[in-house]
Image (cartoon, rainbow, N blue to C red):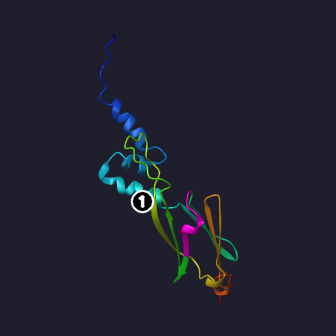
Amino acid sequence: MALKRWEPTKGMEKFFEDMFEENLPSRFLRRFPRFKWMTEVEAVWPAVDMFDKAEEIVVKAEVPGIDKKNIKISVSDNVLTIKGEMKKEEEVKEEDYYYSERSYGSFSRSLTLPAKVAEGKISAEFKDGILEVHLPKVAESKPKEIKVDIK
Protein backbone atom coordinates (compact mmCIF):
# COMPACT_ATOMS: atom_id res chain seq x y z
CA MET A 1 0.00 0.00 0.00
CA ALA A 2 1.43 3.37 -1.01
CA LEU A 3 1.15 6.30 1.32
CA LYS A 4 -0.09 9.60 -0.03
CA ARG A 5 0.98 12.87 1.41
CA TRP A 6 -1.91 14.84 2.94
CA GLU A 7 -2.63 18.06 1.07
CA PRO A 8 -4.77 20.38 3.22
CA THR A 9 -5.71 22.64 0.31
CA LYS A 10 -6.85 19.87 -2.05
CA GLY A 11 -10.47 19.95 -0.85
CA MET A 12 -10.56 23.75 -0.94
CA GLU A 13 -9.41 23.76 -4.57
CA LYS A 14 -12.43 21.67 -5.62
CA PHE A 15 -14.73 23.79 -3.44
CA PHE A 16 -13.65 27.02 -5.16
CA GLU A 17 -13.79 25.46 -8.63
CA ASP A 18 -17.40 24.48 -8.00
CA MET A 19 -18.22 27.82 -6.42
CA PHE A 20 -17.03 29.87 -9.38
CA GLU A 21 -18.56 27.75 -12.11
CA GLU A 22 -21.22 29.21 -14.37
CA ASN A 23 -24.14 28.68 -11.98
CA LEU A 24 -22.56 30.25 -8.90
CA PRO A 25 -25.59 31.07 -6.71
CA SER A 26 -27.48 27.81 -6.82
CA ARG A 27 -24.44 25.53 -6.79
CA PHE A 28 -22.78 27.38 -3.95
CA LEU A 29 -25.86 28.09 -1.83
CA ARG A 30 -27.23 24.56 -2.21
CA ARG A 31 -24.40 23.41 0.06
CA PHE A 32 -25.79 25.48 2.93
CA PRO A 33 -29.29 24.42 4.07
CA ARG A 34 -30.15 27.77 5.60
CA PHE A 35 -29.83 29.39 2.14
CA LYS A 36 -31.84 26.69 0.36
CA TRP A 37 -34.79 29.06 -0.14
CA MET A 38 -32.59 31.27 -2.34
CA THR A 39 -31.93 28.48 -4.81
CA GLU A 40 -35.62 27.56 -4.86
CA VAL A 41 -36.61 31.14 -5.71
CA GLU A 42 -33.96 31.32 -8.41
CA ALA A 43 -35.11 28.06 -9.97
CA VAL A 44 -38.75 29.17 -10.36
CA TRP A 45 -38.02 32.78 -11.33
CA PRO A 46 -38.00 33.02 -15.15
CA ALA A 47 -35.07 34.53 -17.04
CA VAL A 48 -36.30 37.54 -19.03
CA ASP A 49 -35.07 39.57 -22.01
CA MET A 50 -36.63 42.96 -22.78
CA PHE A 51 -35.73 44.81 -25.95
CA ASP A 52 -36.91 47.74 -28.01
CA LYS A 53 -38.11 47.62 -31.58
CA ALA A 54 -39.15 50.75 -33.46
CA GLU A 55 -42.87 50.31 -32.85
CA GLU A 56 -42.96 48.03 -29.81
CA ILE A 57 -41.27 46.65 -26.72
CA VAL A 58 -40.75 42.88 -26.73
CA VAL A 59 -40.33 40.77 -23.60
CA LYS A 60 -39.23 37.13 -23.79
CA ALA A 61 -39.43 34.95 -20.70
CA GLU A 62 -38.20 31.38 -20.25
CA VAL A 63 -40.98 29.36 -18.64
CA PRO A 64 -40.20 25.72 -19.52
CA GLY A 65 -42.48 23.10 -18.05
CA ILE A 66 -45.30 25.55 -17.36
CA ASP A 67 -48.60 25.10 -19.16
CA LYS A 68 -49.77 28.31 -20.87
CA LYS A 69 -53.09 28.10 -19.03
CA ASN A 70 -51.11 28.58 -15.79
CA ILE A 71 -49.57 31.89 -16.97
CA LYS A 72 -51.19 35.29 -16.41
CA ILE A 73 -49.98 38.55 -17.97
CA SER A 74 -51.09 42.04 -16.92
CA VAL A 75 -50.01 45.65 -17.39
CA SER A 76 -50.82 48.37 -14.88
CA ASP A 77 -49.22 51.80 -14.43
CA ASN A 78 -46.55 50.98 -17.02
CA VAL A 79 -45.49 47.79 -15.19
CA LEU A 80 -45.70 44.40 -16.92
CA THR A 81 -46.41 41.53 -14.53
CA ILE A 82 -46.03 37.88 -15.51
CA LYS A 83 -47.37 35.32 -13.05
CA GLY A 84 -47.26 31.58 -13.36
CA GLU A 85 -47.33 28.30 -11.56
CA MET A 86 -45.45 25.07 -12.16
CA LYS A 87 -47.48 22.25 -10.70
CA LYS A 88 -45.98 19.01 -9.45
CA GLU A 89 -46.70 16.22 -11.91
CA GLU A 90 -46.74 13.32 -9.49
CA GLU A 91 -46.28 12.69 -5.81
CA VAL A 92 -43.31 10.39 -5.13
CA LYS A 93 -43.58 8.57 -1.80
CA GLU A 94 -40.05 7.12 -1.75
CA GLU A 95 -37.55 9.04 0.32
CA ASP A 96 -34.36 7.64 -1.22
CA TYR A 97 -33.72 10.33 -3.83
CA TYR A 98 -30.39 10.50 -5.58
CA TYR A 99 -31.24 13.94 -6.98
CA SER A 100 -34.15 16.29 -6.49
CA GLU A 101 -33.46 19.46 -8.48
CA ARG A 102 -36.74 20.21 -10.24
CA SER A 103 -38.64 23.12 -8.79
CA TYR A 104 -42.36 23.60 -8.36
CA GLY A 105 -44.35 26.55 -7.24
CA SER A 106 -45.53 29.92 -8.37
CA PHE A 107 -43.70 33.04 -9.44
CA SER A 108 -44.51 36.66 -10.11
CA ARG A 109 -42.15 38.84 -12.13
CA SER A 110 -42.81 42.57 -12.57
CA LEU A 111 -40.90 44.73 -15.04
CA THR A 112 -41.13 48.51 -15.38
CA LEU A 113 -41.57 49.31 -19.06
CA PRO A 114 -39.21 51.91 -20.58
CA ALA A 115 -42.02 53.58 -22.56
CA LYS A 116 -45.79 53.94 -22.45
CA VAL A 117 -47.61 51.15 -24.25
CA ALA A 118 -51.01 50.81 -25.90
CA GLU A 119 -52.57 48.55 -23.28
CA GLY A 120 -55.44 47.43 -25.52
CA LYS A 121 -53.09 46.12 -28.21
CA ILE A 122 -50.77 43.91 -26.15
CA SER A 123 -50.35 40.37 -27.47
CA ALA A 124 -48.47 37.27 -26.34
CA GLU A 125 -47.26 34.03 -27.88
CA PHE A 126 -46.13 30.86 -26.13
CA LYS A 127 -44.01 28.26 -27.89
CA ASP A 128 -41.46 25.69 -26.71
CA GLY A 129 -41.30 27.10 -23.18
CA ILE A 130 -40.71 30.69 -24.31
CA LEU A 131 -43.32 33.36 -23.59
CA GLU A 132 -43.06 36.34 -25.94
CA VAL A 133 -45.03 39.49 -25.09
CA HIS A 134 -45.44 42.27 -27.68
CA LEU A 135 -46.24 45.69 -26.24
CA PRO A 136 -46.95 48.32 -28.94
CA LYS A 137 -45.76 51.80 -27.98
CA VAL A 138 -48.17 54.73 -27.94
CA ALA A 139 -47.32 57.46 -30.45
CA GLU A 140 -46.01 59.92 -27.86
CA SER A 141 -43.46 57.38 -26.56
CA LYS A 142 -41.73 56.69 -29.85
CA PRO A 143 -38.29 58.31 -29.93
CA LYS A 144 -38.09 61.37 -32.13
CA GLU A 145 -35.03 63.45 -32.91
CA ILE A 146 -35.45 67.18 -32.52
CA LYS A 147 -32.85 69.52 -34.00
CA VAL A 148 -32.04 72.56 -31.93
CA ASP A 149 -30.58 75.68 -33.54
CA ILE A 150 -27.70 77.28 -31.71
CA LYS A 151 -27.79 81.09 -31.53
Q: Give whichever of 130, 67 is nearer the camera.
A: 67
Magenta-span inclusion, residue 130: no
Q: Which residue is mark 1?
A: 41
Number of residues whose C-alpha sits closer than 10 Å to that of mark 1, classed few (under 14), some (14–19) or many (20 or more): some
Which span of residues is magenta-colored? 65-73
Quadrant including the C terminus: bottom right
Q: Quadrant of residue 147?
A: bottom right
Identify the residue at horizontal 46%, vertical 66% (top origin): 107
Identify the residue at horizontal 47%, vertical 51% (top origin): 102
Give SS at disc 1: helix
Magenta-span inclusion, residue 67: yes
Above-or-below relation of 150 to 69:
below
Q: Is residue 118 left or right of residue 104?
A: right
Q: Quadrant of residue 134?
A: bottom right
Q: Quadrant of residue 18?
A: top left
Quadrant including the N terminus: top left
Q: Give whichever of 58, 34 is nearer the camera.
A: 34
Q: Amino acid at mark 1?
A: Val
Above-or-below relation of 84 to 148:
above
Residue 78, x across and y down, in percent = 54, 81
Identify the residue at horizontal 64%, vertical 58% (top origin): 128
Total marks shown come to 1
